[in-house]
Image (cartoon, rainbow, N blue to C red):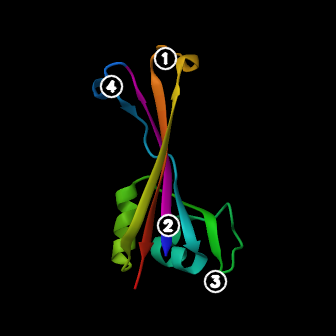
Amino acid sequence: YITIGYRGSYTIGREAQADAKFRRVARITVCGKTALAKEVFGETLNESRDPDRPPERYTARYYLKFNFLEQAFDRLSEAGFRMAACSSTGTCAFAPEQGGPADDKIWTSYTEYVFCRD
């Protein structure tokens, strides 16, 4: 199994969908066995947060050097993985302290995709 996760955020004002402002994915995290993550993502796997992890051990501290979910999904598919599950959570807060109108809201979310290979 390999789990891919990312945090996202966007702002919605009074007009809801008309003026939603989305931010790009800042970082895609990788959780799984070190050897498996290296097999799938190769040189695009950033190991700086857990550099000396043994190949047979699990880690949740790696992330990818690119920011496109589709690219991660393509690499997993090419390595024989299929999506087994996904989950997402979200929270909302008003954002007047960030210079926006008092009725703007900032939504943040965390999404995970679980992939498995038979």
Q: Residue 56's mark?
A: 3
Please tell me whether mark 3 or mark 2 is closer to you in this view. 2
Check the image and report above or below for 89 versus 57: above
Label 1 and label 3: CA atoms lie apart by 48 Å
Residue at x 54% of width, y 17% of height: 96
Q: Which residue is mark 2?
A: 3
Q: Which residue is mark 4?
A: 16
Say which element carries label 3.
Answer: loop
Q: In terms of sequence position, does the residue under pointer 3 or pointer 2 come before the other?
A: 2
Please tell me whether mark 4 or mark 2 is closer to you in this view. 4
Amino acid under disc 2: Thr
Using a 10 Å C-alpha cutoff, classify the residue at mark 4 as few (fewer than 14 neighbours), some (14 to 19) or many (20 or more).
few
Q: Which residue is mark 1?
A: 100
Residue at x 66% of width, y 61% of height: 48
Q: In terms of sequence position, does the residue under pointer 1 or pointer 2 come before the other?
A: 2
Amino acid under disc 3: Glu
The residue sitting at the bottom extreme is 118
Residue 50 position within the rendered picture, expressed as x and y whole percent measured from the top left: 69, 66
Q: Residue 6's mark?
A: none
Using a 10 Å C-alpha cutoff, classify the residue at mark 2 as few (fewer than 14 neighbours), some (14 to 19) or many (20 or more).
some
Say which element carries label 4.
Answer: helix
